[in-house]
Image (cartoon, grey):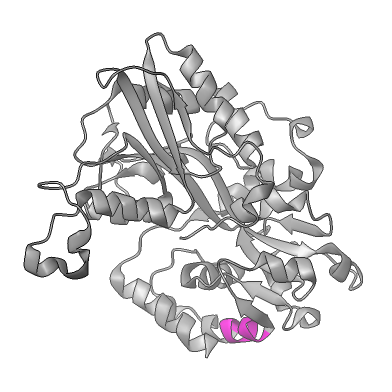
Amino acid sequence: MDRRSFLLGTSTLALSQVLFGCGGNNQTQLKVKLLKGSIPGQIVNQFHKGLQQQVQLKFAPVEQIQDLFQQLQNWQQKPKSTDEQGWSRFIPFRQGQQTADADLVTLGDYWLKAAIEQKLIQPLQEVQGNQLKQWSALDERWKKLVTRNDQGNLDTQGKVWGAPYRWGSTVIVYNRDKLRKLGWMPKDWSDLWRDEVQQRISLLNQPREVIGLVLKKLGKSYNTENIDQVPDLEKELQTLNRQVKLYSSNNYLEPLIMGDTWLAVGWSSDVLPVLGAYPQLGAVIPQSGTAIWADLWVRPAGIPRVTLSDQWIDFCWQPSTAKQISVLTKSNSPISTNIVASDIPKPLLSLLQSDREVFDKSEFLLPLPPSAIKQYESLFAKIKV
């Protein structure tokens, strides 16, 4: 899942490149490549001040999760022979595999299976291990998400491959002014089928997201495998398709702001930063449940374990730190915090104060067999024709 940022200039305390400490190459270091805007710079500063030893911290932001995944791939890429290199012969390769240039990297949970299967990352710990002191503070749902076998599938007897530090969801964002004239505001996925909004909706250009929301409307799971056996699924999708003005995973907010569309389905990481700047926009988490995404810390394969990386993860999981990450990056926390309504700007309140009942109905987009993925992709392509 590619969650792209929109209007990056609206983000507060965006981390450009933070480098603390000085000294020679022998100095203890922690190098982190992270999703831009997902950790406030002041959090890194607080972590550095709390350390007992002299260390060098290097936090380098990257625009997209897809770019971070590709970086993990590049680090594990073996050099090609002279005949195989072609145009890439001008790219310098180190002898053997490239060395990972980070101790920790941000990765989305949707990419976790592929990263494990391709051996791009290594486990953070064994399930029964105690290296991560704050592991016990996580809800069982988060522990289950990142505990997997060597094929990247959920496995309670597996290893811990990632450390979630913030999360969000797929939401409906809408133009209040347009819908107020119609006398209603959206509350659930079924509102996307209303006659009054025909050709006024934009949807993510993602088979799992679009088919998933229809499955949810029908009382099914986002992670349904045999979708060809779900009654009325294709019919519902065809009807929804007639409501859609455009499919886009990148540019769905601009048409909404300009009034070309009245509703859009998007990711909270895109939506929340712009709500304050555009008061005509509102957003809602569908009452029947939605898709959840999480940003994780993962450890690249082939690098030695650095104690500082465990300390950083534990620091992110401390309630006071988790609260700051949540409030400042406009996201939810996997750690229970004492966030109250007064901590959150009013336009964001309904999205950041999670309704436990709705959360329990919501789902991560879990790995599906290749045959199921092909069904999703084929059906999505068919209904868009």
Q: Looking at the rendering, which quadrant does residue 299 occupy?
A: top left
Residue in front for this viewpoint, 19 or 280: 19
Please give the name of the residue rendered at 21% of the width and 60% of the height, measured from the top-left corner.
Answer: 90
- Tell whether 330 sits left or right of 74: right
Which segment is the magenta one? 236-242
Image position of 76 with respect to 81: above or below: above
Q: Looking at the rendering, which quadrant does residue 301 occupy?
A: top left
Could one spot residue 242 in this view of the protein? yes
Residue in front for this viewpoint, 56 or 244: 56
- Tell whether 227 sits left or right of 233: left
Could one spot residue 336 in this view of the protein? no
In the image, farthest residue toward the top? 52
**Residue 194, x across and y down, in percent:** 76, 78
Q: Looking at the rendering, which quadrant does residue 319 occupy?
A: top right
Please give the name of the residue rendered at 38% of the width and 78% of the height, measured from the top-left corner.
Answer: 375
Please give the name of the residue rendered at 92% of the width and 71% of the height, measured from the top-left corner.
Answer: 181
Q: Is residue 209 magenta?
A: no
**Residue 117, x across and y down, in percent:** 23, 54
In the image, farthest residue toward the bottom? 385
Residue in front for this viewpoint, 123 or 355: 123
Residue in front for this viewpoint, 284 or 92: 92
**Residue 364, x across and y down, in percent:** 47, 54
Main SS of the magenta part reads helix
Image position of 195 with respect to 334: above or below: below
